[in-house]
Image (cartoon, rainbow, N blue to C red):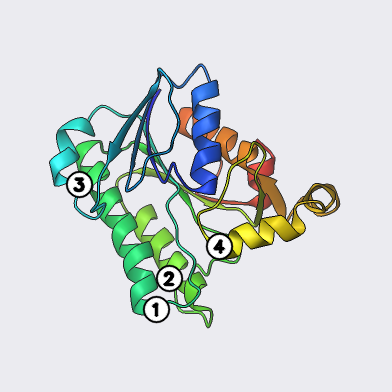
């Protein structure tokens, strides 16, 4: 299975990349992002591309892939809805529409979040933007699956580039393993996410939207 990965330098993407490189069923990973992952591996090829909303220069290199793992994301903190929607909805759909045109039917997994509003019209800004993004992805000619993790525990030194998230992990790190056992419906790991994405890409998903419990079931 050949995989294209967006967001390999983020905390989720780092974990997903690790699982891809460890899994024998994944034969090639093309990581595309604004910054390098810092990982070297025989199965990994990286392209640094400044404008992810315009993949036209990369189209010849995007053909022939079986799956896309889309792990890019930004915090909504301090952003207007317009700015957050541009970075969340517009950018994601630009990538997905390109891949749908180049490889209709390919598996596309999108990391959304627990609490996402499927109506796209709720009171919480990030949740409605994520909901509109999910709905638009599911309408494309892709085998799309939405992943809605809640608290994600980094398992192998994955590190967020967002200061607030780094602070959260620094403060809660000692208790996260306890929360994982006590509240499995609200906690998953970077390992589980990566393994679940690979499984969904290889054999399909039981439903289009996977909540935290569903992710942990893989």
Mark 2–mark 4 distance (CA, rounded to whole Å)? 22 Å
| Mark closer to the chain start, 4 or 1 | 1
User: SS for tag 4?
Assistant: helix
Q: Label 1 to label 2, Cα distance in Å?
A: 8 Å
Q: Do residues under tags 1 and 2 come within 8 Å of each other at their CB atoms? A: yes
User: Circle 2 is placed at which residue position?
Assistant: 129
Count neighbours of disc 1 (C-alpha within 10 A) and say few if under 14, some if 14 to 19, many if 20 or more.
some
Q: Is residue 119 visible?
A: no
Q: Tag on residue 55?
A: 3
**Badge 3 or badge 4: first in the primary sequence:** 3
Residue annotated with mark 1: 81
Of all residues, the one furthest to the bottom in this rendering is: 123
**Mark before the other along the chain sequence, 2 or 3:** 3
For image coordinates 31% across by 51% down, the residue present is: 140
Camera-nearest label, 1 or 2: 1
Circles 3 and 4 in contact, beta carbons < 8 Å: no
Q: Mark 4 vs mark 1: give the one in front.
A: 4
* Callout 1: SS: helix
Viewer-proximal residue, 202 or 46? 46
Q: Is residue 10 above or below residue 73?
A: above
Residue 149 x %, y %: 61, 53
Apparent side of residue 204 relative to residue 59 in the rendered image (left or right): right
Compute the Cα span from label 3 to label 4. Answer: 29 Å
Residue 111 in view here: yes
Q: CA distance from mark 2 to mark 3?
A: 23 Å
């Amino acid at each position: 299975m050949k995989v294209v990965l967006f967001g390999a330098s983020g905390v989720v993407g780092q974990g997903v990349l690790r699982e891809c490189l460890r899994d024998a069923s994944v034969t090639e990973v093309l990581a595309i992002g604004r910054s390098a992952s810092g990982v070297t591996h025989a199965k990994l090829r990286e392209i640094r591309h400044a404008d992810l909303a315009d993949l036209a220069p990369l189209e010849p290199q995007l053909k022939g892939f079986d799956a896309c793992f889309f792990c890019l994301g930004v915090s909504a903190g301090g952003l207007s809805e317009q700015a957050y929607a541009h970075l969340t909805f517009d950018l994601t759909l630009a990538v997905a529409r390109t891949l749908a045109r180049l490889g209709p039917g390919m598996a596309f997994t999108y990391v959304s979040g627990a609490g996402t509003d499927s109506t796209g019209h709720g009171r919480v800004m990030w949740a409605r933007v994520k909901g509109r993004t999910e709905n638009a992805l599911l309408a494309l000619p892709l085998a799309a699956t939405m992943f809605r993790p809640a608290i994600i525990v980094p398992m192998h030194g994955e590190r967020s580039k967002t200061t607030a998230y780094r602070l959260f992990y620094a403060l809660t790190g000692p208790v996260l393993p306890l929360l994982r056992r006590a509240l499995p419906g609200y906690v998953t790991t970077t390992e589980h996410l990566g393994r679940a994405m690979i499984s969904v890409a290889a054999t399909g998903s039981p439903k289009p939207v996977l909540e935290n419990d569903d992710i942990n079931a893989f």
